[in-house]
Image (spheres, rainbow, N blue to C red):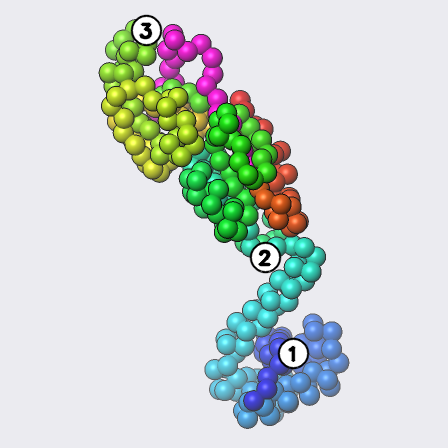
Amino acid sequence: MYISYEQIRAFVCVAEQGSFSAAAKKLNRHRTTLGQVINNLEIEANLALFDRTGKFPVLTDSGQALYLHAKNLAEYTTSFEKACQNLTLGIETDITIYHSDLVPAELISDVMKALRKEFKEVNVHWLHKGTQEVREALANGEADLGIVCTHDLKSISAHEYVYLVSMPFCLCAAPSSSLFESPTLTINDLKKHRQLFLEDYLSAGIEEIITVSPHVQRVESMSVFIALLTSGEGWALVPKHAVNELVEAKKLTEFHIKEVNTTVRFPLALWTTHQSKKGLVRNRITKLLSLLSKKYSL
């Protein structure tokens, strides 16, 4: 049995349009030619797919049984053809991006909204990974791009480096925290209370810089980290973008200590490889990240 993509599409189109004339017009084919395509399909399948006794063709029981299968196959073949066309044009079908949990979720959302205006078919996989995992994935080709939070010489790698933004961090705790019983907060006050520590700080290599309290509680997920912070579990140094709304809603209180008179910042960087430059989608994502990340410097 030999059944072509053309026959499957013709069958689906006639079934959905309700007539050979309408289907021929939609497929830009002559009605007689389309009728022959359906006849050949019925011969190959050894089944009558349409009842032609009336004014319009009606699916037979066999036709009804095969319609959904044909519909799915037609969509897959269309997707396959589109993928072939895109690859010919240098448009990737899939992009994998490893990223730190410190990357603003809104930044990822904004990038995707802008990307979809140009590339509607590509699948972009955003996977939360640590800095070392990003290095390895870029080296072995598992990831196309990596977004990491690093500092100083640790920002330098064998991969190409694109500086995105210097993210501001702030000190926060729940309004009910006993930390605020002291009128003027100092580092010694912070040492007496539990510090929440996001696991990605360790991956980024900034743990020694920001660890103050001997009572450290590590949390892997950003959402759990924020939930524990708002519940009064402890205080934390946290990216401002992650808590701005909570501070405005008075669910968290931003505070300062007299020993630190400047905003703490850590750079967000994009790591790429030479191969990453070859794809149109990867190039566009890189440009969008560079452009849209600037708002997170405030």
- CA separation in Å, label 2 and label 3: 56 Å
Q: Is residue 200 magenta?
A: no
Furthest-front residue in this view: 158
Where is the N terminus found, in terms of image quarters? bottom right
Q: Secondary structure at mark 2?
A: loop
Residue 219, position in %: x, y? Answer: 31, 34
Region in magenta: 249-271
Instruction: Please identify, in this view, whether the residue under mark 2 or under mark 3 is nearer the observer.
Output: 2
Q: Nearer the viewer, residue 50 or 79?
A: 79
Q: Earlier in the sequence, mark 3 or mark 1?
A: 1
User: Which residue is depicted at the point 38% across and 8% down?
Assistant: 259
Q: Amino acid at mark 1?
A: Glu
Q: Amino acid at mark 3?
A: Thr
Q: Is residue 269 magenta?
A: yes
- CA separation in Å, label 2 and label 1: 24 Å
Instruction: Please identify, in this view, whether the residue under mark 3 or under mark 1 is nearer the observer.
Output: 3
- Where does label 2 land, which residue? 93
Q: Nearer the viewer, residue 127 or 111?
A: 127
- Where does label 3 land, which residue? 184
Question: Dot 1 surroundings within 10 Å: few (below 14), some, or many (20 or more)?
Answer: some
Q: Secondary structure at mark 3?
A: loop
Q: Nearer the viewer, residue 279 or 126?
A: 279
Q: Is residue 74 above or below residue 110?
A: below
Residue 6, numbered circle: 1
Q: Nearer the viewer, residue 92 or 121?
A: 92
The part of the image, by quadrant, that contains residue 111 is top right
- CA separation in Å, label 3 and label 1: 77 Å
Q: Is residue 43 visible?
A: yes
